[in-house]
Amino acid sequence: MATDAPPPSKSQPPLPSTEEFVEVQQSAEFGELRRAHRSFAFPLTVAFIAWYLLYVLLSNYAGGFMGTKLFGNINVALVLGLAQFLTTFLIAWWYSRHAATKLDPRAEAIKSRMEGGA
Amino acid sequence: MSPAITQVQQLQLAAGEASEHRPLIITLFSVFVVATLVITVWAGRQTKDAADFYAGGRQFSGFQNGLAVSGDYMSAASFLGIAGAIALFGYDGFLYSIGFLVAWLVALLLVAEPLRNSGRYTMGDVLAYRMRQRPVRTAAGASTIVVSIFYLLAQMAGAGVLVSLLLGITSDGGKIAIVALVGVLMIVYVTIGGMKGTTWVQMVKAVLLIFGTLLITFLVLLKFDFNVSDLLGSAAENSGKGAAFLEPGLKYGLTATSKLDFLSLGIALVLGTAGLPHILIRFYTVPTAKAARKSVNWAIGIIGAFYLMTIALGFGAAALIKPDEIIASNKAGNTAAPLLALHLGGVDSSWGAILLATISAVAFATILAVVAGLTLASSSSFAHDIYANVIKKGQATEKEEVRAARWATVAIGVVSIALGALARDLNVAGLVALAFAVAASANLPTILYSLFWKRFTTQGALWSIYGGLASAVLLVLFSPVVSGKETSMFPDVDFHWFPLENPGLISIPVGFLLGWIGTLLSKEEPDAGKYAELEVRSLTGTGAH
């Protein structure tokens, strides 16, 4: 499904029944999709929050270290701050690549089967 | 270097009597207002059903929505506040900005796509999906409205102060008139243009803001031959604080309490963004979860680039303007960016006047776009969660729902004009942090449990929403934000006992814990069938509309 898909129709397509949803939820295929999302997103979330907290704690309680000059007037604090930007951009890119290769194909297969069968 | 400014000019700016620049600033403000009104009327003509009003017809592209998300998110507090904080406190201003960016990863990894896949118009759609509708919708509506009103109030009062300052209005009546004008404009944008109009206003604002900051950043760097180290060195020297200006500590590191306070603020920023209702409803404006992901990626790029540029703005102001002048113009440094524009162009030249007017107009556009988004979020939630699903028990027609949303917009607009006018002289900047704290304490735990925890029950949802909401609001009520300090909202009384200004450190764990305990203690069984629906839909997009 790309963004240039036709506008969603005003009348909602009928939703598959609850039984069908339960069946899919318990299928191995959906289990793989769930695992592919959770095993990527959960640890990474913990990691970037921990990395941010480490940065905040260093700023709060390790002033001497943060003030160490590296070159010119650029100190550790500035470099670590910019590193937060860099890691944010990298994680966003990394997740998007993971989603495009590991999540989207599985999600689309399940979706088209459920909607086709409805 | 900019020409040395005379004492007289300093005083003029300090008193806010920028009268010579006023006609130009008013002209640019008016151009923006007229342009956005034209867009609004055009969008209004295309707004026919509820999906148009609430979700802009779900036809925006990922890039368009990414721009609009940025426009919705980057408030005047970001633009002027962070530049000002850097100008006055150096590194700590920059430190403050980072939480606002990192936070987007929570939205990207955990919230945006599942929300787009399983909800329709509001945050309440997802929270109530597998729960008993009426109590959870009521709670979601209450939390949405509280978060949005706090945020709105801070923006409205800020708008009054800021625009008065930029226009050189000092009278009380003038300030009230500005607040009323902002309020009336936001009512018009939202009632007529709905989500479509609001989205376009936010996109225009984002483009203006990016180009405005890009221009100033370029001019600052040009002055220092693109040598960032020189820029930082001059800023440290001119600030009078030396190397300490480039290190953490000048604002948040003063005492053990202020350090803890910053930790609390940082956590609330990172966890709050993905629980802000006015941000969440933006994900309904795109057709698919993939497009929602693209929106967040664009937003991360745009917002990140913007905060990187505020480094140049803030340190540029610190390097080129005397700190006394910044403080004299506005104690919190909120006018540092416009002052910087004036200095870069030359205080006496028309180029300086044009730059000042441009940056002032960008700030004005920023305020309008953000308040419109907040009003839309709260009126949508009132109409869709509370009116249609609680009062009318799901029996309201689309027409009735949209009519209710429009009336709610007018009511919320009038209330915020009144509150904004009353609060014009109070220090309400702390309310933005409160909005993030409530979003992180009440909304985020409930969203995450709903999406990812099979056992979560209605009681758990109610406990986390009301518990997180109440603990955040009560802690702030009894904090130095409200009373007991010179910088408090009510400096003349003192009933504070909670030492921190930011409640997140306590209220966020409280929200998560209560959701968990409420679930464990509830007698009802979770609805396994509904969870299967929600889980499969949220991950696959089956039945998304």
Image (cartoon, coloured by chain):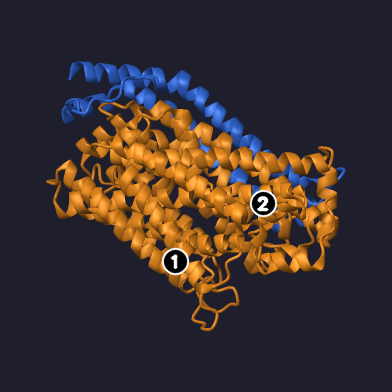
Chain colours: A blue, B orange
Sort mark 1 into few (<14), some (14-19) or many (20+) by Cα contacts within 10 Å. many
The residue tagged with tag 2: helix, strand or loop? helix
Residue B502 appears in the picture as rendered: no
- Residue B420 is tagged as 1
Chain holding disc 2:
B
Which residue ends up furthest to the bottom in the rendered image?
B493
Q: Position of residue B343 (x, y in %)?
A: 76, 52
At x 44%, y 69%, the residue is: B421
- Identify residue type, mark 1: Gly
Q: Quadrant of residue B114?
A: top left
- Identify residue type, mark 2: Leu
Chain holding disc 1:
B
Q: Relative to B363, is B255 on the left or the right?
A: right
Q: Nearer the viewer, residue B425 or B111?
A: B425
Q: Which mark sits nearer the N-terminus, 1 or 2?
A: 2
Q: Nearer the viewer, residue B332 or A15?
A: B332
- Residue B356 is tagged as 2
